[in-house]
């Protein structure tokens, strides 16, 4: 069993969908990834969730979970994107401003592969993509940073 997670900027173009889908299919078919963790903080996460929902029908052996950074409140529709969500132990005590980072730490720790959409070097997505590289995770970049080649797995 191999696990993949996603880190990307809040904003991303819908045109990224074919490239993201191809990357996820390759992870499933060539690397045996069968578990996916995704957040719920913006367009990249929403795009990843959409691709994963589609691929769950083609690859019924895979499982996908939305990893919550906080417990959903009344009327919180974002938590209903998937029937399966995870709320990592210990996040209930995280101060709200640190909840996303602590959730991302948990996802990174679980993962073998990380798919990224990073177009600039600041913000949480860029920080966690770099942390994944330093930890030796296999990083699949879907965008080219000005100072990093597109094939930049390192």
Image (tube, rainbow, N blue to C red):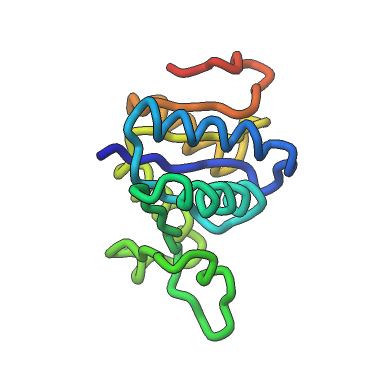
The residue shown at (65%, 23%) is 145
Q: Left or right: 146 with respect to 37?
A: right
The residue shown at (52%, 41%) is 7
Q: Is residue 150 above or below residue 48?
A: above
- x and y, in percent, of residue 104 in the image: 43, 49
Q: Is residue 96 above or below residue 18?
A: below
The one of 33 and 128 positioned closer to us in this rendering? 33
The residue shown at (30%, 44%) is 110
Q: Left or right: 122 with respect to 35?
A: right
- x and y, in percent, of residue 58 in the image: 47, 46
- x and y, in percent, of residue 141 in the image: 55, 27
- x and y, in percent, of residue 78 in the image: 57, 69
The one of 6 and 92 positioned closer to us in this rendering? 6
The one of 116 and 18 positioned closer to us in this rendering? 18
Q: Left or right: 148 with respect to 73?
A: right
**Corner quadrant of residue 148:** top right
What number of labels is visible?
0
The residue shown at (70%, 42%) is 12
The one of 90 and 59 positioned closer to us in this rendering? 59
**Corner quadrant of residue 108:** top left
Quarter placement of the N terminus:
top left
Quarter placement of the C terminus:
top left
**Residue farthest to the bottom, as pictured:** 74
**Residue farthest to the left, as pictured:** 1
Q: Left or right: 44 with respect to 14?
A: left
């Amino acid at each position: 069993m191999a696990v993949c997670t996603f880190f990307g900027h809040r904003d991303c173009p819908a045109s990224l969908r074919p490239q993201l889908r191809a990357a996820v299919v390759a992870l499933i078919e060539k690397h045996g990834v069968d578990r996916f963790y995704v957040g719920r903080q913006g367009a990249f996460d929403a795009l990843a969730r959409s691709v994963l929902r589609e691929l769950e029908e083609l690859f019924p052996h895979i499982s996908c979970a939305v990893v919550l950074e906080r417990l959903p409140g009344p009327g919180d529709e974002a938590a209903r994107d998937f029937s399966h969500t995870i709320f990592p132990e210990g996040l209930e005590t995280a101060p709200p401003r640190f909840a996303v980072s602590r959730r991302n730490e948990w996802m990174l720790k679980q993962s073998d592969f990380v798919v990224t959409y990073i177009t600039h070097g600041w913000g949480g997505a860029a920080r966690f993509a770099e942390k994944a590289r330093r930890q030796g995770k296999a990083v699949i970049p879907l965008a080219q940073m000005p100072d990093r080649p597109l094939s930049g797995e390192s």
